[in-house]
Amino acid sequence: MSKRILLGMLTPSSNTSLEPLTSAIVSELPGVSAHFSRFTVTEISLEDRALGQFDDTKVLEAAKLLADARVDVIGWSGTAASWLGFDADEKLCRRITEATGIPATTSVLALNEILHKTGVETLGLISPYLKSVQDKIIENYGRAGIRIPAERHLGLHVNYSFAEVTEAQILEMAGEVAAQRPDAMTVMCTNLKGAQLAARIEEETGIPLYDSVSTVVWKSLLMAGFDVRAVKGWGSLFQKVS
C-alpha cells in the first residue's frame, strides 16, 4: 500500500469556507486527505482584541493536535500575516516545526512564493476586510516591492460574515480589479469562497487568480512531495506554478 499524504490545516474557529473548499481541492487526489484543527478567531480588525487572537501560543496548541494525526505538513490557512507583517508567519512556521517536528507553511507565505516565482510586480487585491486592514496589506506588499494598483474590499469585520459573501459579489469585485490589468489577482481571505471561481475568473479576465485557500494547499502538497499538476479545475496555479 502506498503511503497516504495527510495535510494538516489550522483553521479560524468561525471559518466555514476553507474546510469544504480544501477537502474539495484534494478530493480526487489518490491517497491525499485534509485534516483540521481550530483556534479562536471571530473578528478581523486592527483592534488589540482582534490582533490578540493570533497569539502563537493558541496556534501552537492547535498545531500539536494535528501532530497527533501524524500529518505530513501543517498549513496555517489564514491571512493574518498580510496585515500583521510577513515575518509573523515566518516565526510561526519555525515555532510549529520546533514544537511538532512537522514542516509548516501558510497561505500568505505560499502566495508570496508564487508571486516571486511568476515575477508579479502588480497585484490586484480582493478581500472582505475593513479599509484599515486593507491599507495595511497594501502597505506590506509595497514594502516587499509589489504594487497594488487596484483593490476592492467590503468593509466587514465579523469573520463569520465573510462566508456569506456571494459568488456574484466576488465575481463583481474581481471584474473591477481586473479592469486595471494587474499581473495577477488574489482573494485574500480563507473564509471568502473564491477558490472555486479561479478558473472562471481567469478565463474571463486573462489574469491569474491566486486564492488564499488554494495557495496553502498548493504549497502543502509540494512540501509533501505531491505533483500539484494532478489538481484539475481549480485555476492555473496548480497547472503552471511548481
Image: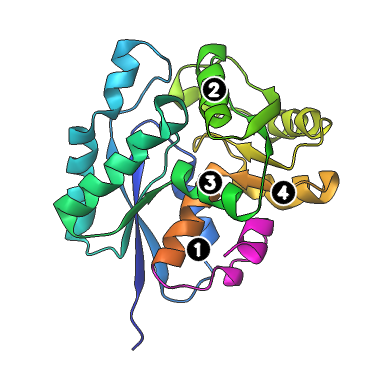
Q: Tell me if I can see residue 97 in this picture.
A: yes
Name the kind of residue labelled 2 in the image: Glu
Q: Secondary structure at mark 1?
A: helix
Instruction: Find out whether residue 104 is within the magenta segment.
Output: no
Question: What residue is shown with label 2?
Answer: 139
Q: Residue 149, percent across and down?
A: 72, 26
Q: Could you tell me how far apart the alpha carbons at marks 2 and 3 are, in whole angstroms?
A: 16 Å
Q: Could you tell me how far apart the alpha carbons at marks 1 and 4 are, in whole angstroms?
A: 20 Å
Question: What residue is shown with label 1?
Answer: 26
Name the kind of residue labelled 4 in the image: Pro
Question: What residue is shown with label 4?
Answer: 208
Q: Nearer the viewer, mark 1 or mark 4?
A: 4
Question: What residue is shown with label 3?
Answer: 111
Q: Secondary structure at mark 3?
A: helix
Name the kind of residue labelled 3 in the image: Leu
Q: Residue at x 72, y 48 (%)?
A: 208
Which residues are drawn in magenta? 224-242
Q: Earlier in the sequence, mark 1 or mark 3?
A: 1
Q: Earlier in the sequence, mark 4 or mark 2?
A: 2
Q: Earlier in the sequence, mark 1 or mark 4?
A: 1
Q: Could you tell me how far apart the alpha carbons at marks 2 and 1 are, in whole angstroms?
A: 33 Å
Residue located farthest toward the bottom when viewing the structure as drawn: 1
Q: Nearer the viewer, mark 4 or mark 2?
A: 2
| Placement of 139 over or under 99, stated as above or below | above
